[in-house]
Image (cartoon, grey):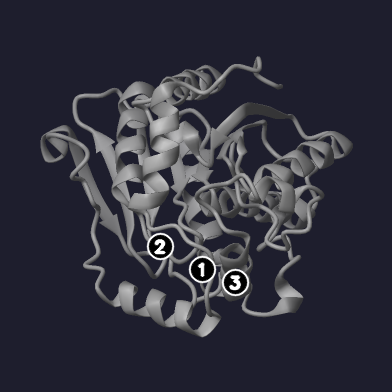
């Protein structure tokens, strides 16, 4: 559904100006240099959850680290809350960046508002790793939490993610469904929430170049390079595990998608809506005029607060 066409708030305009500068967003200069920069930066990462944007995090949340998938998965549980559901959250970052403080702030708010534990997989990153190094393990993790929800009498598992993480959880939902089809049994998710998902790594959706020209944050040249890294091979770019928007969208759980039109990925989000209609998939799409990529993760701007209410209403 399209939201009424209104001008972005002043706070959104400030974020749209400042954030790309803070994140040092710039066009690709050289693929080999970019790979070297990314690898060098990844070597400086210390691991763990960046909680600096959540005051009193250690007092308000219990955190367990699960290594059963072969990489760290953080399980956040709000203290004193009646936990009734689990949200498995796939973080964004172009498959080259780990969980950051903005993700932790968002899921912390979500956990307390929903009464939910949050499962945050810290999956292996490109360019050293591809989708093949984590996809099946992530599906196993999601199935285990879906089964836990069934056994514990909780609300069905929700898969949620932003940007690359949005595409990742959509791919997980498809593989969970496929396992159920093959074996006649198996737990699946009950709902999906997608924040501006990067769900088509081929970047071939009509209008992609035009949307990219207005995006101050994402650059198509880098998107295409990171997509090559994550796919690992040009032949894998259109696989559903990599580009789930191009896969079978039938028999998926009800989903909510939020995205703005000042976003390179908006064209693929629109394509996903069209393909969902053709497949009979219950996908509710909220497209916001002139808003930035993953605007819905920023709770301090009016548009982000509105998006949070929409997510909570959808999951009620």
Front position in the image: 202 or 33: 33
Residue for point 42% across, 23% down: 10
- Cα distance, mark 2 to mark 1? 15 Å
Q: Which residue in the structure is indicated by mark 2? A: 97
Q: Nearer the viewer, mark 2 or mark 3?
A: 3
Q: Residue furthest toward the right? A: 278
Front position in the image: 117 or 107: 107
Residue for point 59% across, 40% down: 189
**Going by the image, does 246 lie left or right of 20?**
right
- Residue 276 image offset from top left, x and y in percent: 80, 38
Other-residue count near label 3 (Cα within 10 Å), few / some / many at <14 / 14–19 / ≥20 = some
**Going by the image, does 9 lie left or right of 226?**
left
* As drawn, 105 above or below 264: above
Q: Which residue in the structure is indicated by mark 1? A: 134
**Going by the image, does 195 lie left or right of 73?**
right
- Residue 47 image offset from top left, x and y in percent: 25, 64
Q: In terms of secondary structure, where does tag 2 sit?
A: loop
Q: In terms of secondary structure, where does tag 3 sit?
A: helix
Q: Quadrant of the N terminus?
A: top right
Task: Mark yes or no: residue 152 visible.
Answer: no
Task: Mark yes or no: residue 168 visible.
Answer: yes
Disc with the residue nearer the chain's start (2 vs 1): 2
Q: Which residue in the structure is indicated by mark 3? A: 225
Disc with the residue nearer the chain's start (2 vs 3): 2
Disc with the residue nearer the chain's start (3 vs 1): 1
Q: Nearer the viewer, mark 3 or mark 1?
A: 3
């Amino acid at each position: 559904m399209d939201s009424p066409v209104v001008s972005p708030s002043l706070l959104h305009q400030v974020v749209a100006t400042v954030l790309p500068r803070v994140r040092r967003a710039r066009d690709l200069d050289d693929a080999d240099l970019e790979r070297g920069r990314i690898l060098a930066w990844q070597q400086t990462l210390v691991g763990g959850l960046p909680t600096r944007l959540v005051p009193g995090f250690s007092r308000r949340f219990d955190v367990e680290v699960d290594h059963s998938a072969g990489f760290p998965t953080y399980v956040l549980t709000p203290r004193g809350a009646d936990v009734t559901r689990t949200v498995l959250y796939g973080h964004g970052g172009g498959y080259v960046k780990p969980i950051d403080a903005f993700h932790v702030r968002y899921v912390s708010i979500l956990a307390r508002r929903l009464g939910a534990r949050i499962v945050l997989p810290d999956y292996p990153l490109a360019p050293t790793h591809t989708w093949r190094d984590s996809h099946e393990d992530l599906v196993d993790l999601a199935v285990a939490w879906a089964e836990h929800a069934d056994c514990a009498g909780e609300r069905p598992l929700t898969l949620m993610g932003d940007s690359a993480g949005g595409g990742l959880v959509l791919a997980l939902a498809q593989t969970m469904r496929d396992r159920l089809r093959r074996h006649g049994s198996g737990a699946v998710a009950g709902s999906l929430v997608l924040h501006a998902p990067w769900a088509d790594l081929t970047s071939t959706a009509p209008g992609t170049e035009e949307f990219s020209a207005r995006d101050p944050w994402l650059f198509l040249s880098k998107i295409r390079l990171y997509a090559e890294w994550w796919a690992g091979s040009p032949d894998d770019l259109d696989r559903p595990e990599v580009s789930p928007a191009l896969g079978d969208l039938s028999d998926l759980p009800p989903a909510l998608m939020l995205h703005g039109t000042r976003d390179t990925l908006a064209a693929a989000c629109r394509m996903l809506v069209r393909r969902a209609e053709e497949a009979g998939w219950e996908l509710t799409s909220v497209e916001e005029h002139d808003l930035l990529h993953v605007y819905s993760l920023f709770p301090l701007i009016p548009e982000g607060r509105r998006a949070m209410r929409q997510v909570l209403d959808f999951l009620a």
